[in-house]
């Protein structure tokens, strides 16, 4: 792990690599929430980011190939955090089909959501990646 | 004025909202004293006893609610506190011995506040957390409630730090400690009671679900959710309110909203994914 420790407004990148296993997810979402708190996100945005990261990682872990590594990177920028989570998969499939409930939920929790499916070399398997952008302040519709 | 004031408490009871247990005990509650003696005299097997007990509990309920309100704004929802206070009241009704000559209030008030204190001390924390962190956490939650109302949005950690005049690192520590804090243990203990007014307020979700392509898989799962959890889910993901706004509407803490949402999403995710 490297990076964004301490202080309001400090930017940097933190990377976490774990086995693609459900056991790792509480650690990863705690890292996300801690970085957001240190970046002075409002408490709603911290909670949303925690939930979005939990959801994203759970989906990726389910798709992951045997013995795959789950890679998460948290880039703390000014007033926002960009999360990139990716994993190797055996079967190519969209982790977040547009219009699905899971896609809708992540769109509500994060300000931007992108899912990428990158084919592997032998045409079999590949890599699935979800990118989230979360702003520091939540604006609700009333 | 605490924003949680009008929720949760009125359900199932028709009580006057302006009750001062110390000021009116000889007025509004005089008839209950006679009932209290009757309750003490009735043999345990008498079916009448249960009815009298219920009358006593609902009659004294405003006292429990009044005391619960005094403990509000410390990071626990008024709804939870009212439930705890009601347990205290039930204990007081059952244990009070009128022939000892004491006033019911001088017995019931310490019993109820004792129950509330014990709740803050024991039930809220799922793991052993040092007292300093518990206090810090309660301060943060109380500041969060105040600032949310002032700012019209959830506060940032730095804003809480300013208000409490503590370093931001302590706020972050207190927030982390909060993850070990589980006021929902009380819900599990008592069983959730649905806030039906809110269920009606949200109505059925047909219009909202139109944008969801896998809605046919989702619909039966939504129907399985407790009404309040479904309402919270709908407010967050279809009305797109923030957790803080939902907390205000439903009358529970933002933390509790967050917990309900995480649990509900987990439930839906598990079942949606196995169904396709």
Image (tube, helix red, strand yellow):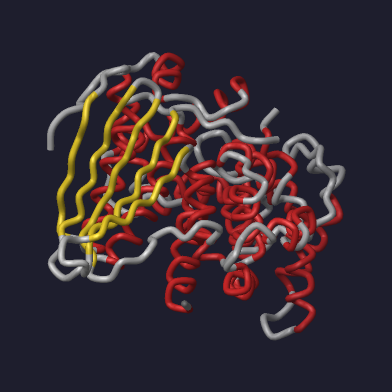
What residue is drawn where x is 45% and y is 45%?
B120
Q: Position of residue B102 (x, y in %)?
A: 66, 50
What residue is drawn where x is 32% and y is 40%?
A83
| Vertical side of B207 occupied by B222: above or below | below
Q: From this viewpoint, is residue B58 visible?
A: no
Q: Where is residue A11 in the image (x, y as percent from the top left)?
A: 26, 22
Label count reads 0
Q: In which quarter of the image is residue B17?
A: top right
| Vertical side of B250 occupied by A38: above or below | above
Q: Position of residue B196 (x, y in %)?
A: 75, 60
What residue is drawn where x is 26% and y is 40%?
B130
Q: From this viewpoint, is residue B272 visible?
A: yes
| Foreground residue among A108 and A114 | A114
Please give left or right for residue A137 compared with residue A79 in the image. right
Q: Where is residue B263 in the image (x, y as percent from the top left)?
A: 46, 60
Q: Quadrant of residue B13?
A: bottom right
Please give left or right for residue A50 compared with residue B151 in the image. left
What residue is drawn where x is 23% and y is 46%?
A72
Assign the N terminus of chain B to one quadrant of the image: top right
Please give left or right for residue A91 compared with residue B124 in the image. left
| Foreground residue among A59 and B78 | A59
């Amino acid at each position: 792990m490297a990076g964004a420790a301490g202080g309001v407004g400090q930017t940097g990148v933190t990377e976490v690599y774990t086995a693609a296993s459900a056991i790792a997810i509480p650690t990863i979402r705690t890292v996300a929430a801690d970085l957001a708190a240190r970046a002075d996100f409002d408490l709603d945005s911290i909670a949303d980011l925690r939930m979005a990261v939990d959801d994203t990682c759970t989906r990726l872990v389910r798709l992951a190939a045997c013995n795959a590594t789950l890679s998460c990177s948290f880039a703390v920028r000014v007033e926002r955090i960009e999360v990139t989570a990716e994993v190797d998969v055996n079967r190519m499939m969209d982790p977040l089909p547009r219009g699905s409930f899971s896609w809708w939920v992540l769109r509500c929790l994060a300000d931007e959501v992108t899912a990428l499916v990158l084919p592997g070399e032998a045409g079999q398997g590949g890599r699935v990646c979800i990118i989230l952008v979360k702003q520091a302040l939540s604006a609700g519709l009333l | 004025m605490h924003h949680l004031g009008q929720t949760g408490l009125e359900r199932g009871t028709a009580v006057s909202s302006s009750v001062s247990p110390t000021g009116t005990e000889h007025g509004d509650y005089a008839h209950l004293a006679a009932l209290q003696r009757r309750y003490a005299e009735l043999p345990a097997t008498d079916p009448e006893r249960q009815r009298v007990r219920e009358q006593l509990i609902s009659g004294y309920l405003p006292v429990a609610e009044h005391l619960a309100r005094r403990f509000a704004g410390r990071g626990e929802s008024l709804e939870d506190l009212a439930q705890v206070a009601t347990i205290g009241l039930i204990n007081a009704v059952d244990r009070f011995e009128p022939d000892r000559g004491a006033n019911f209030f001088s017995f019931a008030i310490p019993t109820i506040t004792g129950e509330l204190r014990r709740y803050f001390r024991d039930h809220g924390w799922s793991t052993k957390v040092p007292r300093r962190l518990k206090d810090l956490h309660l301060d943060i939650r109380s500041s969060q409630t105040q600032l949310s109302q002032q700012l019209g949005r959830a506060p940032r950690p730095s804003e809480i730090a300013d208000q409490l005049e503590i370093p931001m690192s302590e706020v972050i520590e207190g927030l982390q400690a909060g993850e070990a804090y589980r006021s929902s243990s009380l819900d599990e203990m008592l069983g959730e009671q649905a806030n039906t007014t809110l269920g009606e307020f949200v109505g059925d979700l047909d219009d909202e679900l139109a944008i969801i392509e896998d809605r046919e898989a989702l619909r039966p799962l939504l129907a399985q959710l407790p009404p309040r959890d479904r309402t919270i889910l709908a407010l967050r993901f279809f009305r797109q309110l923030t957790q803080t706004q939902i907390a205000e509407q439903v009358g529970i803490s933002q933390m509790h909203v967050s917990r309900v949402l995480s649990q509900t999403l987990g439930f839906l995710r598990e079942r949606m994914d196995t169904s396709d």
